[in-house]
Amino acid sequence: MRLATELRRLREAADLNARQAAALLGVSPAQITHIESGLAGVSEKRLRRLASHYACTDEEFIDALVAVATDRTRGWWEEYRGQLPTSFLDLSELDHHARFRRDVAVLFVPGPLQTEDYARAIFSNRVPELPAEERELRVRHRMARRVIIEGPSHIPYELVIHEAALRIMVSDRAAARAQLSRLLDLSEAHDITVRVLPFALEGFARAGSTMTYVGGRVPKLDTVVRDVPHGSAFIDSEAMLGVFRTRFRKIEEVALDPHRSHDFIHRLAKEL
């Protein structure tokens, strides 16, 4: 779908309609429409021809699009297809292609960092209530997403987490202690940085909402994920990506440094 979106943007930037683009390739307009709707793939040869016709000279960006177009990976998440909502699979695929990830968490610990008990408590309190089988499927899927920070191809991960998310007990005290302990362990990993936004921070309103920033093969293919009532919203316009890059850095700058954040989480764990 992201490939489809970028190809449509390139065509529109070149001020061409689908019929004109189809004529350049010698295919039907319907085929261009299918490609730009994510219903059909596109070969490397055709993608490069389209990029040339669209006067795109960003070779790094074109190469990145080719890499996406020719990736035939059947990821671990495919075993959940038809069992979980598509948004779960989309997030897993986004993780798979990510070069780095940055999270701002306000009320809950981000999914890939959750313990099994924490994740189960989150899904158990969903309204309407989930059948037990689907709840356990979601927990198992969430645990599998840990691969992005613990697997052989783990990626750099930066988290800024509000004190509220650390204090809210989604289950019992034992589960809360285990979750804080996991955060402490992860914060000591080489490629994971955890910073805390304490309640005592004055005059800073930007920490009011959760965001996930996922780095793509090139900056133009970065993606921001925001929670919405019925799943996740994916934001990929270049202007908005710039806004969220700035927003993350401003939040990061005022958060406690990693060492003080580790001590902060440790004190909270001892209180429990």
Image (tube, rainbow, N blue to C red):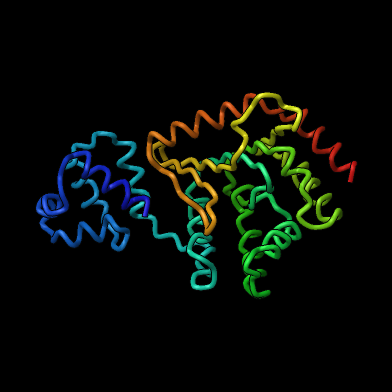
Q: Can you give x and y, in whole percent of width and height, for residue 238 in the image? A: 38, 36
At 76% from the left and 55% from the top, the residue drawn is 170
At 32% from the left and 49% from the top, the residue drawn is 5
Q: Is residue 100 left or right of residue 107?
A: left
Q: Is residue 257 left or right of residue 21?
A: right
At 75% from the left and 32% from the top, the residue drawn is 199
Q: Is residue 213 above or below residue 87?
A: above
Q: Closest to the observer: 254 or 116?
A: 254
Q: Can you give x and y, in whole percent of width and height, for residue 262 in the image? A: 78, 34
Quadrant housing the N terminus: bottom left
Q: Is residue 194 left or right of residue 37?
A: right
Q: Can you give x and y, in whole percent of width and height, for residue 166 in the image? A: 76, 43
Q: Is residue 35 above or below residue 239?
A: below
Q: Closest to the observer: 209 or 267?
A: 209
Q: Can you give x and y, in whole percent of width and height, for residue 77 in the image? A: 53, 63
At 36% from the left and 49% from the top, the residue drawn is 67
State which quadrant residue 40 falls in.
bottom left
